[in-house]
Amino acid sequence: MDKEFEQFFQQQGFKTATEIQTAVYEPLKQGRSVIGLAPTGSGKTIAFTVPLLEKTAPGDGTQILVLSPSQELAVQTTDVFRQWGAVNNIKATSLTGGANMQRQIERLKKHPEVVVGTPGRMLSLIHESRLKLKDIQTIIVDEADELLTGETLDEVREIVMSAPSDVQLGFFSATQTHKPAELEEIFGVDIEEFDVRQTDKTQGEVVHGLVRVADNKKVVYLRRLAKLKHFQALVFFNHVSTLEHVAAELKHEHVSSVKLAGHQVQTERATAMRKFRKGEAKLLLTTEMAARGLDIANLPAVINFDLPPNAIAYTHRTGRTGRMGNTGMIVNMGNDHDLRNLRKLLPEKTFKPLYLMHGKLTDQLEEEKPAEAVETVEKKQAKAEIDPNATVVMMPTAKPRKEVKKHPTKAKPSKPAFAGGKPKKHVKKNKHSKKKGMRHKNIERNDRKK
């Protein structure tokens, strides 16, 4: 690493380079095409940013293209290039779908040395001759396993074919879908592979947990999680329709949440990301689009509201937490059938039941408490006959009430019997009966006078 960049590297709080950064540094700086495979959160962006910037000449036109699968990742990568490019006066800009194209064209007129964007928008500007590739030296395909499938593979290939024939290529991802020989055949260049996934130790301790919950109770569980202190999570859905339904329910319940989906305009997506990064929202509801490359500092948890369809999706989703040595937690929600299928999908993973206890989410069923102060969790569950994964509330045992001695009451003396042997029957008179009798007496008296 050049002296200026090494000094900046240390100023950012980094002590040593990660394995992927060390592995690809010299090959990239020498202009060789590479595949870089490393776990999520291991510093892949800096792994290709630093060596490429060191060999970029200020003022010589656009020399680096970086292709990203989403607007959010493109903006994030652009920020990294701008931050590190300040060391040697290199400018960077982003080109993404959903943003104002005319503004992007105006920025291209300033000839930034680095352009980061989504393949569709880049290709549109190339066709309009707004983005010129004659000075391009390197093209980086970030999250390559995502971009090198379906229609995006054709777009990436067309962009590469529009660049000079000796262009350097770099493919980076946490999972692999293409071998070097396949990529060499597709793009016509020699490619070296650097795979450090098994030796990299940058990821912190991550608990992969299971929560047994019915579909109609998942939103209730999300609401409980959102009430926990110091808790934030990315919540993943398989379908936008489910995401919208849950977002509406959480909004009705006044739960602190935002949503991030492909059909939103860029300003809405940017606002959602800003609120979540600042901690103004507890939950960020999203689809697979946020599973790639997003770096959210110290994210406590990832929640799979819908379990991912395959192991690759699980790897990228869960890679948003436990990054660069931090701890994290994965909350997988589903019924018995769903969780059983998840274990089959990822047999190498160790899954633990999760519990909401004492105002926090934990994989420990019982915490140490004085025996005389609380009842055991088992007794609580036995009494309430609740699901072991449901919320368990630990309450102090009630003190036994003091026994109050009751004094015998004296028996009331019975009334003496009447002489006739039977008590006189009390007849309740009508309140009008007396007046009625008096009227009869008055009438008789008047008749006698006559």
Image (spheres, rainbow, N blue to C red):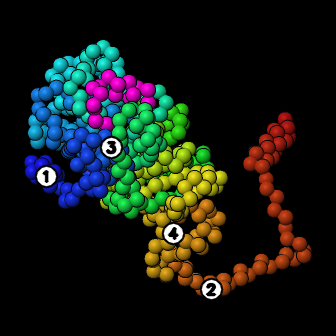
Q: Which residue position holds label 3?
A: 34
Q: Which residue position holds label 4?
A: 365
Q: Amino acid at mark 1?
A: Glu
Measure the C-alpha gap from mark 3 to mark 2. Answer: 94 Å
Q: Which residue position holds label 1?
A: 6
Q: Given this view, does label 4 or label 3 mark the residue nearer the observer?
A: 3
Q: Quadrant of residue 419?
A: bottom right
The location of residue 235, given as percent across then percent down, is 45, 45
Instruction: Name the residue: 13% across, 52% down.
Output: 6
Measure the C-alpha gap from mark 1 to mark 4. Answer: 47 Å
Instruction: Name the residue: 18% across, 19% down.
Output: 109
Q: Amino acid at mark 2?
A: His
Q: Is residue 274 left or right of residue 52?
A: right
Q: Is residue 338 above or below residue 355?
A: above
Q: What is the secondary structure assignment of the residue under circle 1?
A: helix
Q: What is the secondary structure assignment of the residue under circle 4?
A: loop
Q: Which residue position holds label 2?
A: 407
Measure the C-alpha gap from mark 4 to mark 2. Answer: 49 Å
Residue 59 in view? yes
Q: Earlier in the sequence, mark 4 or mark 3?
A: 3
Q: Given this view, does label 4 or label 2 mark the residue nearer the observer?
A: 4
Q: Earlier in the sequence, mark 2 or mark 1?
A: 1
Measure the C-alpha gap from mark 4 to mark 3. Answer: 47 Å
The location of residue 168, given as percent across then percent down, is 28, 35
Q: Is residue 1 above or below residue 163?
A: below
Q: Which residues are magenta?
A: 153-169
Between residue 277 and residue 445, name the one nearer to us: 277
Image quadrant holding the C terminus, namely top right
Q: What is the secondary structure assignment of the residue under circle 3?
A: strand
Q: Given this view, does label 1 or label 4 mark the residue nearer the observer?
A: 1
